[in-house]
Amino acid sequence: MADGSVTVVLPCLNEAASLPGVLAAMPDGYRALVVDNNSTDDTAEVARRYGAEVVTERRPGYGSAVHAGVEAATTPIVAGGGGAG
């Protein structure tokens, strides 16, 4: 079990429907950081409601979203997720 020193970056585009299940399955001690990459649904609001930190990346694309998440992470260990959906 992690002690809060691991951030899992989740690049997301219109993942409001998928996020509750993904965030509920996050292991204890891991911090979820959702990078909203121009979503037109409630991705950011849903992520916050389920306890994730949210950053916004306006440059489109998976790589831009991952980079923004790595830059925003404040823990010593950062893991990349494949997105919520």
Image: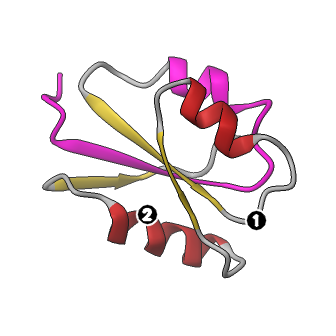
Q: Badge 2 is on which residue?
A: 69
Residue 72: give x, y in percent of width and height: 35, 64
Give the image location of residue 76, x and y in percent. Answer: 13, 55
Name of the residue lying farthest toward the right: 40
Q: Is residue 19 magenta?
A: yes
56 up-or-down from 59: above or below: above
Looking at the image, residue 3 lies above or below residue 76: above
Front one among 18 and 54: 54
Whether residue 50 appears in magenta in the rendering, the answer is no
| Badge 1 element | loop
| Segment tinted magenta in the rendering | 1-24
Q: Are marks 2 and 1 in contact (CB under 8 Å)?
A: no
Q: Residues within 10 Å of mark 1 (few under 14, many from 20)?
A: some
The residue to which callout 1 is attached is: 38
User: x, y (%) of residue 50?
Assistant: 55, 24
Disc 2 marks which amino acid? Answer: Gly
- Please state which of residues 76 and 46 is positioned toward the viewer in this rendering: 46
**Which residue reaches farthest bottom?**
59
Asked if residue 68 lies left or right of residue 27, the reply is right
Question: In the rendered image, which quarter contains the C terminus?
Answer: top right
| Drawn side of residue 80 relative to residue 4, left or right | right
